[in-house]
Amino acid sequence: MALYKVEICGVNTSKLPLLKNEEKEALFEKIKEGDMEAREQYIKGNLRLVLSVIKRFPNSNENADDLFQIGCIGLIKAIDNFDASMNVKFSTYAVPMIIGEIRRFLRDNNSIRVSRSLRDTAYKAIYAKETLTKKNLKEPTVQEISQEIGISKEDIVFALDAIQSPVSLYDPVYSEGGDTLYVMDQISDKKNKEENWVEHMSLTEAMKRLNERENYIIRLRFFEGKTQMEVAEEIGISQAQVSRLEKGALRTMKAYLTA
C-alpha cells in the first residue's frame, strides 16, 4: 500500500492545515452551536490525524485512498460524539474510533465473506445501539435494539456474530506516550467480581500504600469490574493514564504482598 504519495483522495497531504489548540477549542464551541462551516473546518484541520492512523496499516492490501476515506468516517463520528467537558484531548478520543472504523472495513473485506444482508443488519444494529446509547445515556439491550430497527433479536445476534473476527486478548489497540492499551484492557472482567485472587487475599494493608486516585482506580477495576475506558470517563483522564496508574498501583501492591 503506497502511503507516501502527496495526494490521497484528491487531497494534497502536504498542504493539510494544522489547527492550534486555541483554534480547536473555538471551532468546537461553534460546532456545538450547529455551525456546519466550523465543523467542516475542524474536519479538515484533523485530517493529518487520519493520515497518521492509516500508516499503522502498512501490511494491508487495501488502497490508501479507501483507508483514508474510511478513516475520515471515523474522524467525523469522533467529532460528532466528542464531549470536551470530559477533559480528554480530542486526538486521544478520536484515534481509537478511527482505528475501529478502519478495522471494521478491513474485517468486512477479508477472505471470509459475509452476505450483504447480514452486514446490513449488523450495521443497522450498531447504528441503533450508538443512537440509543447517546439518547438514553446507557447501553441498550438487544430487545431495545430489536424494537428500534424492527428486526428479531435472534437475527441481530447472528448478524453481529457473523461480522466478528477472532482477536487475541493481547492484541494492541492503541498507544499513547509509550503506554500500549490491549484488547484485554477494554473488557469488563466478571471474574474480578467473583473469583479473582483479590477477593481471596487480605489487601487492606496493601491498598493503604496507594494514593487516593490509585486506590479508587483499583477499586473500580478489580472490585466493580469496570473497563479502563469506563474508569477514564468516570474520573476524567485518558485511558492511557488509567493504564499507567493501574500498572503502578499493582506494582506497589505486589511489592508489599511479596516482601
Image (cartoon, rainbow, N blue to C red):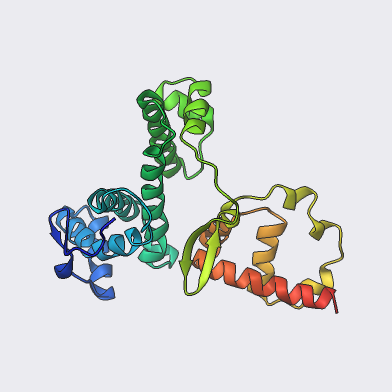
Residue drawn at x 58%, y 72% is: 244
> Residue 226 occupies which quadrant of the picture?
bottom right
**Image position, residue 132 (x, y; %):** 43, 38
**Residue closest to the eye, 223 or 175:** 175
The answer to whether 252 is drawn above or below residue 169 in the figure is below
Front-most of residues 158 and 212: 158
Seen in the picture, residue 139 relative to 239 is either above or below; the reply is above
Is residue 37 toward the left or the right of residue 57 in the image?
left
Relative to 166, 216 lies left or right: right
Q: Position of residue 23 (x, y in %)?
A: 23, 72
Instruction: Tell me the quadrant of the picture where the C terminus can be found.
Output: bottom right
In the rendered view, tell whether residue 61 sits above or below residue 208.
Answer: above
In the image, is 95 to the left or to the right of 18? Answer: right
Percent of width and height locating residue 113:
41, 31
Residue 27 vertical position relative to residue 100 in the rendered view, above or below: below
- Point 18% across, 59% down: residue: 38
Q: Tell which of 141 and 76 is nearer to you.
A: 76
Could you tell me which residue is drawn at 35 percent across and 61 percent down? 53
- Across the whole image, how many numbered discs are drawn on residues? 0
Of the 4 image quadrants, the one containing the N terminus is: bottom left
